[in-house]
Amino acid sequence: MRTVEKARPDAVRDIEGGTTTLGIEYGSTRIKAVLDDADDRPIAVGTFDWENSFEGGYWTYPQEQLVAGIQAAYAALKDDVKARYGVTLRRLGALGVSAMMHGYLPFDVEGRLLVPFRTWRNTTTTAAARELTELLRFHVPERWSISHLYQAVLDGEEHVARIASFTTLAGYAHRLLTGESCLSVGDASGMFPIDSTTRDYDRAMLDLVDARLAERGVSLRVEDLLPRVKVAGECAGHLTPEGARLLDPAGDLEPGCPLCPPEGDAGTGMIATNSVAPRTGNVSAGTSVFSMVVLERPLRDATSPLVDLVTTPVGDAVAMVHCNNCTSDINAWVGLLMEFAELMGVPVDAPEAFSRLFGVALAGDKDAGGLVSLPFVSGETVMGVQTGRPLLVREQAARLSLANFMRMNVMSAFGALAAGNEALRAEGVRIDKLYAHGGIFKTPGVAQGILAAALEAPVTVMDTAGEGGAWGQAVAASYMLNRGERETLAEFLSRRVFSGVGSSTVEPDAADVEGFRSYLARFKAANRAELTLEGRQG
């Protein structure tokens, strides 16, 4: 087990000896820092909760919180180390930063942010994504960084003339700590298409975009603006004195430790689930949900709007089905039910509420009894939804019960994902192992079984599933430090990190599969109402 509580007793030796690795990840609702011992087991953790806001037409986080948040998470980690082991954290063996993929952070030549951070959640780039997809004959999603840049060009935004560089959130944090502008190939593949043979940006596509920009009177070379690409195992710079003081304003942290390439949450999810080899995959569920399947051959259709082509942290091609919405609507409904419980004089805490409500979902009808919800708090590209508004719809004869209501919510969390994965089954993509991680899987057997029915594949949840992306990035830092000569990332993970880790696998139940197929048909039909409300044709 890789829980903090069962970390090895000689962790103090690793802390004081500087043989630990630290992973920090900017999630959508929490910034988390995880410190691993020399055997890649978590020994301390620190967190900082935050929320995005919708301002000026964009989903964003304040720039000051991008720095204050990582400082708060690290400070909480230091406090945890002190409380558990009685020592002050001063030295690190290696460090890595990861974050939500995609989005848009453009800077001028002085390093000033030109517009507030535009996150992956924004779907304001439809025109740019469509034009780039047609130009490149390659599906360019709305949330990709190049879509945001090109949309700014199409909209004539004044800041375009002053752009000297642009990057992702992980790339921004990494630059603050090291002074280096680079990204892991996995995170870079959410900025601009990657050529998996060169493990770098696709040269021919760069030329096409530059030519299109020139046609529009914009004298930018995209390659000059993008971060350098690195692969897992490479050193991506060292913690500078300024970076150490930024991370730890108290001044205890020593500079000089190496950093692994800054990664996106998709890449850390692959590492945290040991799914970086061909024909393995994982599902990461949180505010958003996405599936990642490492391909053994190229897809026949590289333009499908349902599938994004990204890479593993070492540059192998991955088919990604990304959905903007997963647990936000469930969280809202559970919060409402908790309010009702408090009103009735029987308040419950959140963990118990989620556990009991998820458990009752197993008693619901396999198709949720005629209920259906569209949990689109934000736009959902897979379903053609640009803005998003949560809807709950029920047939006249629907069986409205708590069990069906909760089963509906869990099924809806995977509805868009199931619709997107139909394209992969049509391509004949084979999956030997599919791992799932995220808080939605904490109640045993509920979301895991429903996901198996949704994707019609066995789903495995490992004992490490709760560790998350911050732990995955700490492991990436360990790979940089401790890998054997010519040892691949997949070999390192299997040999060193996941050997002996327990897991549980749920095979898709035939009745659950039939029920989910029926539910998915209603989900798609209800989506026509969503599109109508947007003034678009369903």
Image (tube, rainbow, N blue to C red):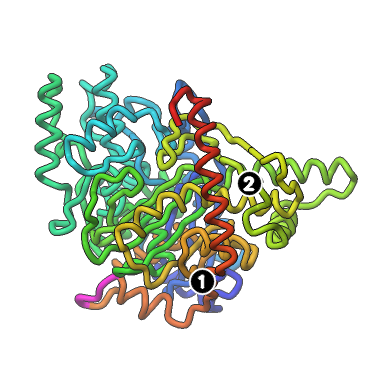
Judge from the rendering whether residue 206 lies leftward or rightward of residue 442; answer left or right.
left
Give amino acid for label 2.
Ile
In this view, the residue in front, 262 or 203, is: 203
Residue 333 visible in rendering: yes
In depth, the one of 121 and 480 nearer the eye is 121
- Residue tagged 2: 330
Q: Residues within 10 Å of mark 2 (few under 14, many from 20)?
A: many
Near mark 1 (Cα within 10 A), the count class, few <14, some 14-19 or many ≥20, is many
> In the rendered image of this protein, does residue 286 appear above or below residue 217?
below
Q: Residue at x 42, y 60 (%)?
A: 22
Mark 1 lies on residue: 462
Specify the amino acid type for callout 1: Met
In the figure, 49 relative to 355: above or below? above
The first of marks 2 and 1 along the sequence is: 2
Q: Would residue 243 be counted in the magenta stretch?
A: no
Which x, y percent locates residue 36? 46, 67
Q: Position of residue 77 (x, y in %)?
A: 53, 56
Viewer-nearest residue: 1 or 47: 1
Left or right of 31: which side holds 476? left
Part of the protein shown in magenta: 485-489
Q: Position of residue 394 (x, y in %)?
A: 67, 40
Q: Residue at x 29, y 68 (%)?
A: 278
Q: Residue furthest right?
A: 345
Could you say whether the residue bearing mark 2 is in a helix, strand or loop?
helix
Task: Give the mark toward the camera: 2 or 1.
Answer: 2
Q: What mark, if any, has residue 191 been given in the picture?
A: none
